Image (cartoon, helix red, strand yellow):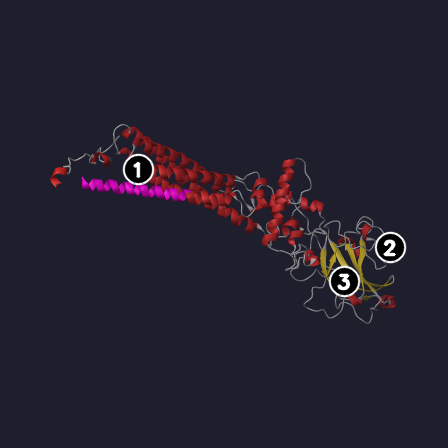
Amino acid sequence: MLPLLLLLLAAAHGLQEVTYEPTLAQGDLGGRITGSTFVLEQPRCAFDNSTIQPTTSIWLVVADAAASVSFTNSVQPGMPEWAFQSFPANTSAYLTLNATLLNYPCPKDPKEITVLRVGSETSCAKEMSRPTCNGPLPSPGTYKVKFLALNGFEPVAETKWSKPIELKTARQPPSGPGAGGKHSADMIAITSILSILLAVLLAGLVATLAFCGSDPCGRGGIFKPEVASVRRYTTHHVYDQPAARL
Amino acid sequence: MAKTENGVRIFQGLLILGNVVIGMCGIALTAECIYFVSDPHGLYPLLEATENDDIYAAAWIGIFVGFALLALSILGIIAVIKSNRTLLLVYIILMLITFAFEMASCITAATHRDFLTPNLFLKQMLERYQKPDAGNNNDKWMSEGVTKTWDKLMLQNQCCGVQGPSDWQEYTSAFRMTYSDADFPWPHNCCVLDSRGSPINLDGCKLGVPGFYKSNGCYAAISGPMNRQAWGVAWFGFAILCWTFFVLLGTMFYWSRIEY
């Protein structure tokens, strides 16, 4: 009797629970998860045309993963209790990214990138007058999201909760550049070979000066080609006798 | 006597040839080192900010060693032709001094090449890029140099970060303190820019859609020129010194056998 009553109650409220589960964006996106934002796939073909009217608002509910179990659908977007600015200190969930079914046409064009970036509006992050601001998430803590369709303040349909989403935590830059840690083989080869060459040269110079400093070594005198050169001297000419020509 | 006369002439010819080669290599070394010192890739501010720019010091020494080799090779040729003991001794001693300097240059270039790792540039980029006005002038000047160099690198080489744009997400940085993560997951120059310098698709860039942001890292663009410089100075210098070694040995032998 009780289950039947509950079913009747649900039917009376008209809350349809669709099987769609919100997921992070598919495809190769470098910014899918950053320190304060994440990117979801749009809920295309998630809701049923018959239950959702064109004026129904489809909201994104962002909740702290631990608190998502206690979230009820009796929410009032735009009220301070559900404002982004109160999250996570005064509220465990907030609503943002208001859209209608027209924003999510079905079927989806496979060539398009259809995503929702959660956390992209930085200008209204501190303005209480914009409670449905899509502001950057304050901490990397785990979050869960779901889509909730409301007619005014009455829930009409909801998706499942997503899997827990954890954002990136930045760490300190690596310390220690590894200076002098690793000496490459090239450097060792150059240093050792050049040191040996210099040592041999110095030894050779010292030896040459010591042994062959004053007198030439070996067979002396042969490395001075100029000694064998012939000195020029004037020959005796017989000058033309002017008388002989006469 | 004719045979030894020929032997002397051949030995002299070899020494002169050796000195000619040394002279030409000296010119080549000077030219190569001037090219490196002129910093065609504009990477010097990065090294300056690491406070360890010994690769440039090695190149500077190379310029002067090259000139010295040229001058000494001419002296050597004259000394061998005249077979003058004093001149040859002067030549040998000056050449040994030049040898020692060039050896220092080669070893410096090789050792400090090992110091340039990706982590070094990563740490420097994260600490100095877009750092707001710091304390003293020196620090501010180094940060400005690093910022300008990185902006130019990212623009010209179509790259972002040291290993990729994820560097800006994984680590805290001076950039992150000024620019929020939601507005700037990575710096402006990491987006693909049009001819006027604005991103072709800002949302695509923030999302990280391939084609709207630069997904590869700049380390190759930094390490390529620096490796070429270090190895160019080190190995070419090493080759010159090996040749000089033999020429000097020959000259010492020649010197020991001539008489005054």
Inter-mark Cα distance, 1 to 3 = 94 Å
Element on which disc 2 rests: loop
Q: Which mark is residue A79?
A: 2
A222 or A37, nearer to the observer: A222
Q: Quadrant of the N terminus of chain A?
A: bottom right
| Residue B177 vertical placement versus A218 (above, below) | below
Q: Which mark is residue A244?
A: none
The amino acid on which the numbered mark 3 sits, given as a three-letter code, is: Lys
B73 or B98, nearer to the observer: B73
The residue under label 3 is A160
Residue under mark 3: which chain is it in?
A
The amino acid on which the numbered mark 2 sits, given as a three-letter code, is: Met
**Residue B41 in picture, x, y percent from top left:** 55, 48
Magenta stretch: give its range: B1-26
Magenta segment: does it hold A83?
no
Numbered circles on residues, count: 3
The residue under label 1 is B80
Give the quarter of the image for residue A70. Answer: bottom right
Q: Main secondary structure of the magenta part?
A: helix
Q: Residues within 10 Å of mark 3 (few under 14, many from 20)?
A: some
- Residue A158 is left or right of residue B185, and the answer is right
Dot 1 and dot 3 within a common chain: no
Task: Decide which of tag 3 and tag 2 comes sooner along the chain.
Answer: 2
State the residue at coordinates (25%, 41%). B9
Dot 2 and dot 1 within a common chain: no
Element on which disc 1 rests: helix
